[in-house]
């Protein structure tokens, strides 16, 4: 796809005179402009944008940490020009394009004008989300995992919005939640699990996986859970636009009432918010009030790993939670494994 009318103005660079050219001393070659100067200006502005964004998010984070019950009613102003530019540069340059065919390189050619126009549309409510392009990647079991590839501008706005929301929810999410969180990874989760297993009395491990979570999760419940903390209707409408934009496959746009669009920028955060209210808070309360003995919980959305000294409590917990998850569209499957601990820190399966 070409956009000839949207190319940035070419930088005027004075040509170097040939040896045969006769030029008066009063007419020296003009210095080259553009490449070096523009690069320095862009680097400076990007640093200023990052500093501005960092300060804004820190203020949001502090407010969220100090006022745990507060609903934030004014958040959209944080999705400003600096935030949108920072979000753009955080996107992978070789990321697959969405339905609009727009690539990172093409968008950057006229970045200032495009970002200003995008910001104006987001601010006024005129911004419209495009359908995501359906793509598939193979899974280990031979099946295919459906992905939703968003258009570039949707990725930018989603990433900017997710940064603002993360500043709030990182103060709310519990310590045993590791999936899709800044500064955390599945490796950290497994390290935490291994340390606790080898240092405490553990005889049983529960491994649960929420089947088809990203494609089956209720959009209605996602929005309702967001509204516990987000009172800015403009942010809620943005999320609803992405959830309702649909998916384009074989020339047909399909709009679902479930799923968060696995592969989209905003999807992991929405998944964590959903699990925070559906499972994490319940599991933490159960561990504090009903569990006996040592118990370890590690969540890498949508996978749950838990360990305890006894099996009765966990079998009861597994049954209770399966029933709880069935009250939402996402169902679960689980495996219960018995272990015995020895003087050796290794764990041996019985």
Image (cartoon, helix red, strand yellow):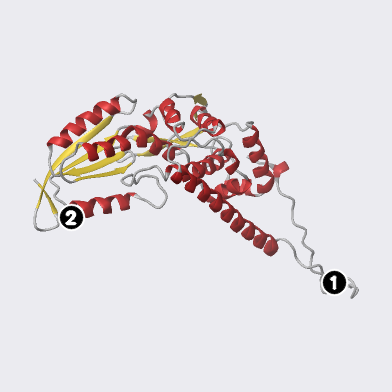
- Please state the horizontal and vertical placement of residue 311, each as a whole percent of the image: 13, 38
148 left or right, relative to 284: right
Residue at horizontal 69 percent and vertical 62 percent from the top: 35
Q: Nearer the viewer, mark 1 or mark 2?
A: 2
Task: Examine the rendering and report whether any part of residue 250 can be seen.
Answer: no
Q: Residues within 10 Å of mark 2 (few under 14, many from 20)?
A: few
Q: Which dot marks residue 199?
A: 2
Q: Pointer 1: what residue?
A: 28
- Please state the horizontal and vertical placement of residue 219, each as a whole percent of the image: 43, 27
Task: Examine the rendering and report whether any part of residue 177 can be seen.
Answer: yes
Of the residues under marks 1 and 2, which one precedes in the sequence?
1
User: Compared with residue 14, is residue 26 higher up or lower down, i.e. above or below?
Assistant: below
15 left or right, relative to 229: right
Q: Nearer the viewer, residue 7 or 216?
A: 216
User: Compared with residue 344, is residue 131 higher up or lower down, i.e. above or below?
Assistant: above
Quarter holding residue 299 = top left
């Amino acid at each position: 796809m070409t956009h000839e009318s949207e190319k940035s103005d070419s930088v005027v660079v004075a040509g170097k005179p040939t040896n045969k050219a006769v030029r008066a001393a009063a007419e020296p070659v003009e210095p080259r402009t553009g490449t070096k100067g523009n690069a320095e200006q862009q680097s400076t502005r990007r640093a200023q944008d990052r500093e501005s964004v960092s300060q804004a998010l820190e203020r949001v984070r502090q407010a969220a940490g100090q006022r745990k019950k507060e609903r934030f009613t004014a958040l959209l102003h944080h999705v400003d020009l600096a935030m949108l530019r920072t979000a753009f540069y955080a996107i992978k340059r070789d990321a697959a394009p969405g339905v609009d065919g727009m690539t990172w390189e093409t968008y950057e050619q006229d970045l200032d004008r495009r970002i200003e126009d995008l910001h104006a549309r987001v601010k006024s409510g005129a911004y419209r989300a495009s359908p995501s392009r359906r793509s598939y990647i193979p899974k280990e079991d031979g099946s295919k995992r459906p992905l939703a590839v968003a258009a570039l501008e949707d990725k930018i706005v989603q990433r900017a919005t997710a940064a603002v929301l993360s500043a709030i929810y990182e103060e709310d999410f519990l310590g045993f939640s590791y999936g899709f969180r800044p500064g955390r990874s599945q490796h950290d989760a497994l390290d935490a699990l291994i340390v606790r297993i080898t240092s405490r009395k553990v005889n049983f491990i529960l491994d649960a996986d929420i089947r088809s979570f990203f494609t089956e999760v209720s959009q209605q419940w996602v929005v309702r859970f967001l509204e516990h903390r987000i009172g800015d209707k403009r942010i809620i409408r943005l999320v609803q636009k992405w959830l309702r934009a649909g998916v384009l496959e074989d020339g047909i746009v399909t709009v679902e009432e479930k799923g968060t669009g696995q592969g989209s920028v905003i999807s992991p955060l929405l998944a964590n918010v959903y699990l925070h209210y559906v499972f994490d808070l319940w599991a933490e309360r159960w561990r504090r009030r009903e569990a006996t003995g040592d118990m370890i919980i590690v969540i890498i959305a949508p996978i749950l790993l838990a360990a305890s000294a006894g099996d009765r409590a966990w079998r009861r917990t597994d049954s209770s939670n399966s029933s709880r998850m069935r009250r939402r569209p996402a169902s679960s499957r689980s495996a219960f494994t018995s272990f015995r601990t020895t003087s050796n820190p290794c764990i041996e399966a019985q």
